[in-house]
Amino acid sequence: MSSLPYLLNGALVTIKLGIISMLLGFVVALPLAFGQVYGNRIIKKLVSVYERVVRSIPLLVILFLIFYGLPSLKIRLPEFTSAVLALGLRSAAYQSQIYRGAIQSVSGSQMKAALSLGMNRLTAFFYVILPQAVRIAIPPTGNEAAIVLKDTSVVYAIGVSELLRQGYYIITTHYEPMLIYLTVAFIYLILTVSINGLLSLFEKKFKIPGIGAEGGPNDY
């Protein structure tokens, strides 16, 4: 099909959006998860409010708030940057819950041991708890990555030339909507299966046998 190179270019944009958005979500989610597990009551409440509010608002509304709303505050962001922020900040709310659960599944005695060796809580978290929590979080993170990848399809609404928008452009000139959309769907399927397969390999390679058998991190 002569249109395939254009769809593949759109798929590359989709992949780039998905990767950068997941990384942004990870960077934001870690302090949120840390605050939920180890923070005081105020921090836990603030994180809970952020997580619930962001998860309750449709992604398209968040996207429009960033792309069309921020200019009213004299903040203008490019289409791609707006898309990454919307996807990343929304993913952070979900990833924070993934990592909160993973952190809590690591034995609380390990935090006690780290503190007894003279580490502060933050250092113990990064060097003792987090490496294990990240491994535990691989399966649900794979599911979240697949969701983010599929959610990139909504950013066509602000003009980002990702996979779905490229398909729309082709349809307007070739008038083959069924063939084009089936091809787009197949590419999304291949990308999603590839993500899940890759993360399954990582899960098997870095799995920690027997973890989570003891109490959680708050048992001290």
Image: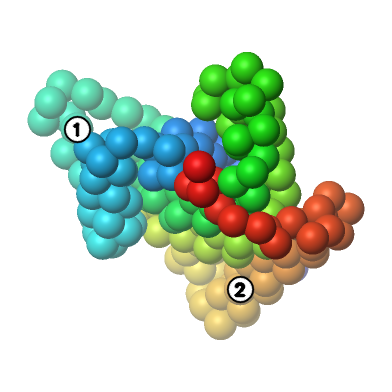
Q: Which dot marks residue 62? A: none
The amino acid sitting under disc 2 is: Ala
Left or right of 35, for residue 125 = right
Q: If you read the primary sequence from the N terminus, does the residue marked by circle 1 or circle 2 appear first?
A: 1
> Foreground residue, 59 or 94?
94
Q: Quadrant of the N terminus?
A: bottom right
Left or right of 137, for residue 220 = left
Q: Residues within 10 Å of mark 1 (few under 14, many from 20)?
A: some
Is 176 placed above or below 163 here? below
> Foreground residue, 13 or 48?
48
Local SS, label 2: helix
Left or right of 170, for residue 88 = left
Q: In the image as oriented, which residue stretches furthest toward the top? A: 118
Residue drawn at the location 51% of the way across and 48% of the way down = 219
Is 25 placed above or below 144 here? above
Q: Which dot marks residue 70? A: 1
The amino acid sitting under disc 1 is: Leu
Asked which colour scheme the image uses, the reply is rainbow
Q: In the image as oriented, which residue stretches furthest toward the right? A: 205
> Which residue is disc 2 drawn over?
185
From the viewer's perspective, is the residue at label 1 or at label 2 nearer? 1
> Foreground residue, 25 or 192?
25
- Say if residue 87 shows up in the picture: no
Local SS, label 1: helix
Residue drawn at the location 55% of the way across and 69% of the way down = 174
> Foreground residue, 190 or 207?
207
Q: In the image as oriented, which residue stretches furthest toward the bottom? A: 178
Residue drawn at the location 51% of the way across and 68% of the way down = 171
Q: Tell me where residue 21 appears, x and y as whole percent.
A: 51, 42
Q: Tell me where residue 201 appears, x and y as whole percent.
A: 85, 58
- Dividing the picture into quadrants, the one containing residue 198 is bottom right
